[in-house]
């Protein structure tokens, strides 16, 4: 199982915003920090803002901040918002044409596995995974040692 980049970036954006405390972050800053597309992060930020996980401050000194306290942001909820589905195999999708679906026992196992995965995510909040601001800088320096000078 693998989360989409969209979900990965959503969780990273929330972690980054949480680590900033009261300081507003910008999409440009986050894109540089994570070395990802500004356009893609803009879509992620819009989704998170519409859902209330981030709040946007408009204007020249605007930016993004958490829309709720980190302990009120459930990781499972964020992943369910950003993932299109948890269909691990064809038989769990609409339009399934697998010829063994009626007798297959794998489907039940995978449904249980996906439920366990989601239950684990539901036990954690953003507060559980917040990093220190220096942790983001350390990652950026490891990616591009020239910026350390």
Image: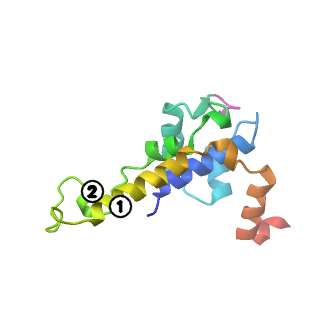
Disc nearest the viewer among 2 and 1: 1
The answer to whether 32 appears left or right of 135 in the picture is: left
Please give left or right for residue 51 compared with residue 66 in the image.
left
Which residue is at 74% across, 56% downward?
Answer: 136
Do the CB atoms of the residues marked 2 and 1 lie less than 8 Å apart? yes
In this rendered view, identify the residue nearer to me: 46 or 74: 74
Left or right: 58 in relation to 47: right
Image position, residue 60 (x, y; %): 68, 31
- Residue at left offset 60%, top offset 30%: 55
Instruction: Look at the image and say whether residue 124 sits in the magenta stretch.
Output: no
Q: Which residues are magenta?
A: 59-63
Q: Quadrant of the N terminus?
A: bottom left
Residue at screen point 47% across, 58% down: 3
The image shows residue 74 at horizontal and vertical percentages of 57, 40
- Residue position for label 2: 92
Task: Please give the label number shown on residue 110.
Answer: 1
Which residue is nearer to you in this view: 101 or 51? 101
Magenta stretch contains residue 62: yes
- Looking at the rendered structure, the secondary structure element under dot 1 is helix
Along the horizontal axis of the image, is 24 left or right of 111?
Answer: right
């Amino acid at each position: 199982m693998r989360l989409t980049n969209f979900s990965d970036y959503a969780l990273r954006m929330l972690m980054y915003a949480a680590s900033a405390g009261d300081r507003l972050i910008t999409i440009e800053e986050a894109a540089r920090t994570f070395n990802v597309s500004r356009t893609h992060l803009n879509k992620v930020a819009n989704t998170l803002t519409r859902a209330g996980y981030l709040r946007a401050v408009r204007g020249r000194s605007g930016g993004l901040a958490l829309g709720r306290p980190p302990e009120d942001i459930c990781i499972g909820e964020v992943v369910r918002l950003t993932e299109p589905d948890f269909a691990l195999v064809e038989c769990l999708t609409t339009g399934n044409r697998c010829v063994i679906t009626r007798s297959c026992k794998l489907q039940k196992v995978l449904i249980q596995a996906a439920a366990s995965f989601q239950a684990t995510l539901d036990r954690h909040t953003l507060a559980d995974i917040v990093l220190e601001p220096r942790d983001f800088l350390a990652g950026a320096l490891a990616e591009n040692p020239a910026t350390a000078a």
